[in-house]
Amino acid sequence: MEQREKNPLKVAIIGTNGIPAKYGGFETLVEYLTLHLGNKFNLSVYCAKTPKEKRLSEYNGAKLIYLPFKANMAQSIIYDYVSFFHAWLYADIILILGCSGCTILPFKYFFKRRKLILNLGGMDWQRSKWNFLTRKFLKFSESMAVRFSDVIISDNTMIAEYLKKTYDRNSHIVEYGGDQAFRVELNGNVDHYFFLNQPYYLAVSRIQRDNNLEMMLETFSKLPDKTFVLISNWDFSPYGKEVKAKYGGYKNLHLIGPIYDQKELNLIRSNCVAYIHGHSGGGTNPALTEAMFLSLPILAFGVSFNRATTENKAEYFNDEFELKDLILTLKSDRLKKIGEEMKEIADRRYIWSKISSKYADVFLAEN
């Protein structure tokens, strides 16, 4: 890494589990921002509760600040509030990833002036996993985030249009990268995953209802001659355990736990027939941009966000029947064409060095 510039701006990044990244779009974003911008800015990243023996003092040149709270579920609001208050003590710029804790932002007028940059992510309040009251709170938090942030970043054109229509706020469109993914050929090494010896379809996703994993599994459970591999964090929630128990007995379904070794993950991704992306939440999902960078044919859930990411050049489904039809009717030449088009888009739009440069421009720009 090049020597850091003299008197760099202090940038605090809050709202994530922290780095090194495992699964999670925001965590992956932070990992590559620190990698590419660590020599230009004085970066600090707030990290969720972590055992002391596993803590790092810095990563990619960024200072890691650990808080005694979890970044998810009930403690997430406290985690965000404490992050805000602590960052306000020293930072020139606070990059806020997500808006669940942004009900605190109206208090910014009681503190020294800081530049607040918001990356909304998706419209979290729309997700089916939340109950009525939680959705109301998240929608209110979103409105506070958009109203009181100085600058807003949208990772998808559909998010930008939503912000303009709903709140009359303009935003900078800065997407996610995908070039951290790299192809790994088989070379006969298939002992651990015997399904690599045969054609298979693949999805990599967190176990959340709005990612439509049950729809995929139900579809392939009725296609016993088609192999489907689904990598997810099954044991994270009762829902995940329930889904795994329901579909784990099918011989053509391979339900695999999280894989953090990138070479191993890329081996499985690189050799599938097609990648199935079921996310229905808004935004540009990193798992999708990575699959595109690997030249994988994409079958995506047909929401506007996925269509924008793939420039309407993938194949799309809206229910089990449409997904089944795609699996049974798409020919190899069409799949190859989709893969080539996905790679062309990824090379043009989803490179982390380009993404990081756009963030640097936002950091340095006048409000």
Image (cartoon, rainbow, N blue to C red):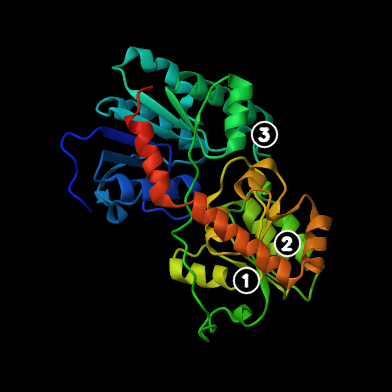
At horizontal 67% and vertical 48% (from top left) the residue drawn is: 209
Residues packed near mark 3 inside 10 Å, few (<14), some (14 to 19) or many (20 plus): few
Mark 2 vs 3: CB contact within 8 A = no
Does the image show residue 123? no
Q: Amino acid at mark 1?
A: Cys
Q: Is residue 42 left or right of residue 291?
A: left
**Occupied quadrant, residue 272:** bottom right
- Residue sitting nearer the eye, 80 or 225: 225
**Residue at the extreme left of the image, as rendered:** 6
Among numbered discs 3 and 1, the one appearing first in the sequence: 3
Disc 1 on helix, strand or loop?
A: loop
- Residue 299 lies, with reference to residue 156, above or below; the image says below
- Residue sitting nearer the eye, 79 or 12: 12
Q: Position of residue 5 (x, y in %)?
A: 18, 40
Disc 3 on helix, strand or loop?
A: loop
Return the residue at label 2.
217
Q: CA distance from mark 2 to mark 3?
A: 25 Å
Among numbered discs 2 and 3, the one appearing first in the sequence: 3
Q: How many marks?
A: 3
- Residue 73 lies, with reference to residue 302, above or below; the image says above
Q: Give the foreground label among 2 and 3.
A: 2
Disc 2 on helix, strand or loop?
A: helix
Kindly identify which numbered label has been placed on residue 297. Answer: none
**Occupied quadrant, residue 88:** top left
Q: Position of residue 107 (x, y in %)?
A: 40, 16
Q: Position of residue 277 (x, y in %)?
A: 65, 55
Return the residue at label 3.
131
Q: Amino acid at mark 3?
A: Asn
Q: Give the foreground label among 1 and 2.
A: 1
Return the residue at label 1.
272
Q: Give the foreground label among 3 and 1.
A: 1
